[in-house]
Amino acid sequence: MQWDVVATNFDYLLFGAYPEGPLGGLAMTILMALGSIFGAFWVGLVVGLMRLSPRAWLKWPAMVYIEIIRGVPLIMLILWFYFLFPILIGKTLPAIQSAMVTLVVFTSAYIAEIVRAGVQALPKGQMEASRATGLSKMQAMIYVILPQALRNMIPSFVNQFVSVTKDTSLVYVLGVTELTRAAVQVNNRTLSAPMELYMTILVMYFVICYVLTSYSRTLERKMARYQARG
Amino acid sequence: MNYDFQWNVVLSGEYLDWILSGVKVTCQISAVSLFFAMCIGTLLAVMRLTRFKPFVWFTAIYTEFFRNTPLLVQIFFWYFGSDGLLPRFALDWLYDHDFEFAAGVIALTVYTSAFIAEEIRSGINSIPRTQLEASRACGLSFVQAMRYVILPQAFRIIIPPLISQALNLLKNSALCMTIGVAELLYMAKQIESYSFRAFEAMSVATLIYLSISLVVSFTITQYNKHFMRTVSY
């Protein structure tokens, strides 16, 4: 057991080379997860509502988008975006940007499904009543349906955030120094304590994800009480 | 865009063999992991229901820990870290055989079994508690009641979520590329570096993953429709 390797490199695992160099480590992981969930929320909301539309030209593209993204391993998407789109578009994206775009695209497909399920879970009467009071479909969506549906979706969003946090580890293949990459670097430099290092970052990921998961469970329990029923 | 596609380079001769062997390894690693994950997952779910405190704590810690940490790091942990964990003879045996494959199977099994355990537990919980009590009252032991009464009913309900877990497992197996298991994505990358036909190789691999996923998710939808019509709880 060589826990001193972990102890001496603990700063690096937390912040990367931050004050002297670029930010990395756990801080980078959290920032990337926050950024991607924020981007993915808006894209996912639009795609999810498109998927619910009765018009074929809105519904089908959304369906194809969701099915393709959800049917392919994330690591494959990451490689597509980073190595192959430059061939098509003709210019390269820096690793971090490319990773963020991939995570947003990937997560948005899952959020779209959450949005769809959330809207469908509301009683039909809500939409019918809003339409009957003279709101247009768009207005009914924005002022009546979404405010209720989105609130019910918050626990699912938190769970999705946990998934994104775990997914950011895959960005390691592009060389972005988030937590996993930082640990691999330290391991390559020291070579003596792989078990201790990976155990440490597993625990770091676990602390963040577990806190969030428990929070989402509490939220779910609280919200079950205030739901509009059919 | 000026890129001339040469599909026959990838879809013939040696490169085609590579892709096929990649598909084979992907299927193998997924099937082996799925088998073990199902066994361990069922065991964990039943242990959780025994209400024997050490079992309950153990399963709770196991499922929470492995569900809330990234699979990639778990793969690294088993692959690079097992040196300090396993006894010498086990390591020697593993190094003589396919250690990458074994580490991949262990990581995928442990990760997936945590998810499967939760699915099975919720399946068992959806069977009314009185079923268990009635079976116990008939004189069946706890294990017998599980085996003959509760689990057969629970498994019927959880088949769709279990299949989607299997699908996730198949997609997750692509991560074993990072430790050098020669599965589909690894082979696609290898063809890319030998032939520089990156676009074609990746497209073929993507299409294979995609078609498996789409066929399976279509089957689940059909099963759900059929199931909803015939059974109602």
Image: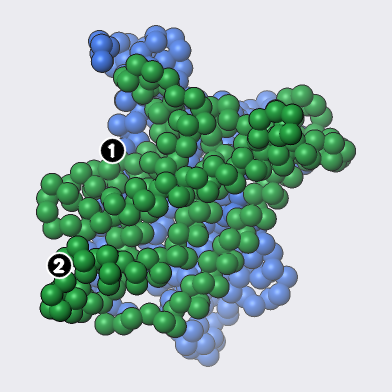
Tint applied to chain A in the drawing: green
Q: Is residue B34 visible?
A: no
Amino acid found under the numbered disc labelled 2: Ser
Q: Is residue B188 left or right of residue A121?
A: right
Report x, y in % for residue B54.
73, 70
Is residue B180 positioned above or below B162 on the image?
A: above
Label 1 Cα crowd, 10 Å radius (few <14 / some 14-19 / many 20+): some
Report x, y in % for residue A113.
33, 56
Label 2 Cα crowd, 10 Å radius (few <14 / some 14-19 / many 20+): few
Q: Residue at x 47, y 87 (%)?
A: B130
Q: Looking at the figure, which quarter contains the C terminus of chain B?
A: bottom left
Q: Is residue A102 left or right of residue B96?
A: left
Q: Looking at the figure, which quarter contains the N terminus of chain B?
A: top left
C-alpha span from label 1 to label 2: 40 Å
Q: Is residue B157 left or right of residue A23?
A: left
Q: Quadrant of residue B44?
A: bottom right
Q: Is residue B197 left or right of residue B134?
A: left
Disc number for residue A136: 2
The subunit carrying tag 2 is: A
Is residue A5 positioned above or below A220 on the image?
A: above
Tint applied to chain B in the drawing: blue
The residue indicated by pointer 1 is B211
Is residue A117 positioned above or below B210 on the image?
A: below
Q: Residue at x 28, y 69 (%)?
A: A143
Q: Specify how the rendered protein is coloured.
A: by chain
The subunit carrying tag 1 is: B
| Viewer-side residue, B215 vs A207 | A207
Q: Quadrant of residue B96?
A: top right
